[in-house]
Structure formats: structure tokens, C-alpha cells
Amino acid sequence: MSDSPIKLLVMDLDGTLLPHGGAISVRTAAAIRAARERGVITTISSGRNIPSFIEYARTAGVNGPLIGMQGAIARELPAPGETGSGALLRHVPFTSTLAARAVEWCRQNDLWGHAVIQDDYAFDATDPHYETYQGWLAGNSVERLHSIKDLAHHLRQKNDEISKIVAHAPAGHPETVLEQAREAFGGELDITISHPEYLEFTAPGVNKGTALAWLASRLNIPLAETMAIGDQHNDLEMLLAAGHGVAMHGAPEPVQRAARYLAPPSEADGAARMIERLILGLDGE
């Protein structure tokens, strides 16, 4: 625990800055801008891959390197008008052979697993979520989205560096198999839940907590002078690592226990209120 002035603010996106089905509020963007004006470096750490949240980062007004895929990747925030995903600063992948095992384990346990390779996605041709991602990626789907016959076999034949495996299932099912997945892969992969429908596999030691520590070290900021805000299982290590860990209202109980503070719901500008309180010295009401 720390009462040191906060110099680095790292925020989850979905369910934290971004209410589910909503938008980043004017109040949230204003609070982040005010924190920046006080010299605080601000950024987003998300389970998403970075191209999918660059525009949200610009809306929020953050100024630090962006962290994606549970900490597996970090990039500079592209300047306005700059094309691409930003300069690559960090990538911690795992082997495609191990990814094939994870995809097979997912199918055996009633989940659909796809591979993320930096900015690109590889789906099994039978995976019904492929069409969903076509809609999400819109104009970028042709170059970034790949449908592959027998994805697990394909991965075994490749020598790719895999950033993450994402597995989809009906809400709640990932939580029922989380411990089984961790037992199945031991120390070979880190496994977490980023959303009630998503079980995610990353390289050992890759999580938002180690990513926060990496970024703080890069910026020469003590962890005691960092603040992190999140709402899901994949935020737990980040909240533990930060000097000022904030869990959103409704976060799973283990995540709330890992935090120093509990924020109001995202729909009530909970993240903004905590920035106002802990960084700006306002009452946050």
C-alpha cells in the first residue's frame, strides 16, 4: 500500500473506462486530461489487441504506450494521422505447438479457441465466431482475419510466435473450467478470464501486473506511485502490483480483495470519480 503521489495511471478498457454497450464519457475523458495536466502518464491496458482500441485511447486522451493482450504486447500510441498500430515496444509470445494444444483443449471442453498473432487472428473454419469478428474488424478483416481448415493442425505445422489464444463460450462457462485449464497447462501458459465469455491463454508470466511493472520500470516510476483500475479476473495481478489498485463495482470477489479501493459502476463514471479523488484531490461525487 502507498500514499505516494501518483505518476502513472493504467486503466482497463471494457467495463472500466468503457461501460458495456456504452461509450467513454465526457467526464472520464476530462478526468484523464486533468491527470495528464498534472504530469501523470496515462494509458490503457486491455485484453484486446491494440488496433481494436486505438480510437478509444484517443477518445480517452491517454498519452502513454498502449498495452494489449493481457500484457503480451505493448506499442507506442500512433500520432494523429499516423497509419498502423504504433511502434512495437514489447512482445512476449509462445510457440504455435503450444497454441495448438490449447486450441485442442478448448474444443474438448466446449470452447472455441482462436489464435492471435500480433495484429492478426486465425480461426478454425468451423468456428462460428469468425463472422462476429468480420463485423468487428470491418474494413480490416481481409488482411487481419484468417479462416483455416483444422486450426490446431495448421498451428502444429507452423513456427509462428503466438501472442494469445482466446476461447469463446457461453457466459459463465469459462469460469467453470478456469482451474481445469490451469491444471492442464501447469506453468506452460498463463490462463485468465477477461470477460464472462472469454478464457485466454498467454505465455508464462504474461499478465497485466507484469506489464504494469515493465512499463513503470521503463518510465522510471516506482510501483508505489502507480494507480491501476480494472473490473475482471485479468486485472487482478495489475491491481495487486499497483500502489493504488482500484476495482470497479461488480468485479469478481477475488478482484475486489486484490484492490485497495472500490469504485462506483462504470455506468456512473466510476473510473473518473476515482481519478478525481486519488489524483486530482476532489471528492469524486
Image (spheres, rainbow, N blue to C red):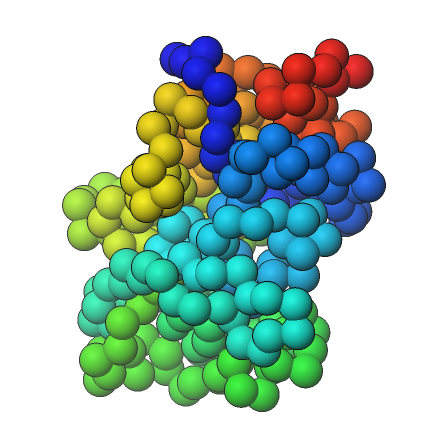
On the image, which quarter does residue 109 sit in?
Answer: bottom left
On the image, which quarter does residue 192 sit in?
Answer: top left
In this rendering, position of residue 206 left or right of residue 64: left
On the image, which quarter does residue 278 sit in?
Answer: top right
Name which residue lies at 49% across and 19% down.
Answer: 5
* Quadrant position of the C terminus in the picture: top right
Residue 246, horizontal then vertical, whole percent: 54, 24
The correct choice, above or below, for 285 with respect to 141 in the image is above
Number of labels in the image equals: 0
The correct choice, above or below, for 224 with respect to 89 in the image is above
Residue 277, horizontal then vertical, whole percent: 66, 17
- Residue reaching furthest left? 187
In this rendering, position of residue 65 left or right of residue 61: left
Q: Which residue is nearer to you in this view: 279 or 131?
A: 279
Name which residue lies at 35% across and 56% down.
Answer: 72
Residue 53, horizontal then vertical, whole percent: 61, 59
Q: Which residue is nearer to you in this view: 146 or 57?
A: 57
* Quadrant position of the N terminus in the picture: top left
The correct choice, above or below, for 217 with respect to 159 in the image is above
Specify whether residue 150 is in view.
Answer: yes
Specify whether residue 259 is in view.
Answer: no
In this rendering, position of residue 82 left or right of residue 245: right
The correct choice, above or below, for 5 with respect to 231 in the image is above
Residue 187, horizontal then vertical, whole percent: 17, 45
In this rendering, position of residue 192 left or right of residue 34: left
Name which residue lies at 44% across and 61% down.
Answer: 75
